[in-house]
Amino acid sequence: MKKITLVLDGVADRPNAALDGKTPLEYAKTPNLDALYRKALGGTVLTIPEGLEVGSAVANLSLLGFDPYTYRGRSIIEAAGLHLPMNEDDLYIRCNLVTFEGDSFETSRIKSYSAYDIATEVAEPVVRALAEEVFGGEFQLIYCGSFRCTLIVKNGKRLYPVDFMPAHDIIGQDIAPFIRTEGKQAKFFDLMKKSYDFLQEKAIPANGMWMWGASVMPEIKGDTRGRVALSETLLMDGITTIAGLPNIGTKREGRTFEDFLEEKLEKAIGAVREYEDIYVHIQETDDLSHELQPVEKMEAVEAIDRVFLKDFLKNIGEDYTLSVASDHFTFSDTGAHGGEPVPFLFYDSRNEREQDGRFTEQSGRDKQYTITAAELKAMQKQAETER
């Protein structure tokens, strides 16, 4: 029996005025997802245990069946996905090229957390110059494509943890309350200010840098036999690299979302034929939330249902279980994450159920049935033993 998990990153949301007071899931036309939901078990699943970072790293570790408490920050996971040098004594920090608005660094607001998805060919030469001009010594700035950079602090593990607010969580807000001028964080904000001053003279969409996701080496362990992931993000590349889990990537950049989904569908069907446990992760809905685009997010949900899910279900070809969930909430009105339990469905092709409703946030809450991600994973194993 095949065990399949489909994660729609950040698809869970709250009502938005641009969608007549509905969430993207509520507004979208999703006949295939809704038909599946009516034959499945529904409710909500807690993907982020209390006290842990609210975001895709912890949530996907949980849904993959790995221990989320092994998480030690995001940047080193992405560095692993890029196959950068890994050193247990170093500190790794994610750096975003951003677009600020304001008259100075201290009085700025973040207008775009990705410098409007700055093109690699535009950003790379500038970042290389920035690395030489501003960074050095214990600080090594590495360009990672588009708006992403990694800062490696040599022998910096002693500084962990270092708390920063993610750029995508403070879009449109004054950064002044988040700046620290004393203690171990002060040196990093000084580097951000120097980067801001350097980038003011460059005619590119990025006029500053924002650090977040400080991390040290985690230990992600679990049985990966017969398993595979299909994803397209550095984060998922890193998780699977550290865990030793095979990962089949699909790149979104430079083409339409529907073209991307067609390739994702082909690879997912191939994975079902080769592997027993298949984890499919789709990122687009989260990205559109961070860009404050609720209508486009709704359209992406419809495309996933129409282009991917419809034909994927037709081509599984044998008994299977399918879990569908958001990994966390991502609010398309603010771009921030939410850690409350997310909607899920659990479908067993040999044990179809009957329930009313659609796959939405409120339908999940209405079931008044909340489980943990570990319990959702256990459902798959139990269904397999009962065959």
Image (tube, rainbow, N blue to C red):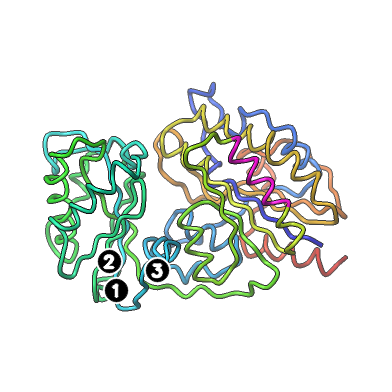
Secondary structure of the residue carrying numbered label 1:
loop
Secondary structure of the residue carrying numbered label 3:
loop
**Count of marks overlaid on the render:** 3
Q: Which residue is mark 1?
A: 90
* Cα distance in 3D space between marks 3 and 2: 15 Å
The mark nearer the N terminus, 3 or 2, is 3
Q: Is residue 70 above or below residue 362?
A: below
Q: For the stretch drawn in magenta, what is the main secondary structure?
A: helix
* Picture residue at 57% right of the left edge, 69% below the top: 66
For the question of whether residue 51 can be seen, the reply is: no
Instruction: Give the residue type that dot 2 points to.
Output: Ile
Rendered-image quadrant of the N terminus: bottom right
Quadrant housing residue 114: top left
The x, y position of residue 176, in whole percent, is 18, 45
The circle on residue 221 is none
Secondary structure of the residue carrying numbered label 2:
strand
**Magenta part of the protein: which range?**
258-269
> Are the residues tagged 3 and 2 within 8 Å (C-beta)?
no
> Are the residues tagged 1 and 3 within 8 Å (C-beta)?
no
Does 359 sit left or right of 17 as displayed? right
Rendered-image quadrant of the C terminus: bottom right
Q: Which residue is mark 3?
A: 72
Magenta-drawn stretch contains 341? no
Instruction: Give the residue type that dot 1 points to.
Output: Asp
* Cα distance in 3D space between marks 1 and 2: 7 Å
Counting other residues with Cα less than 10 Å from the Cα at mark 1, is it few (<14), some (14-19), or many (20 or more)? many
* Picture residue at 53% right of the left edge, 40% below the top: 285
Q: Which residue is mark 2?
A: 152
Does 375 sit left or right of 290 as displayed? right
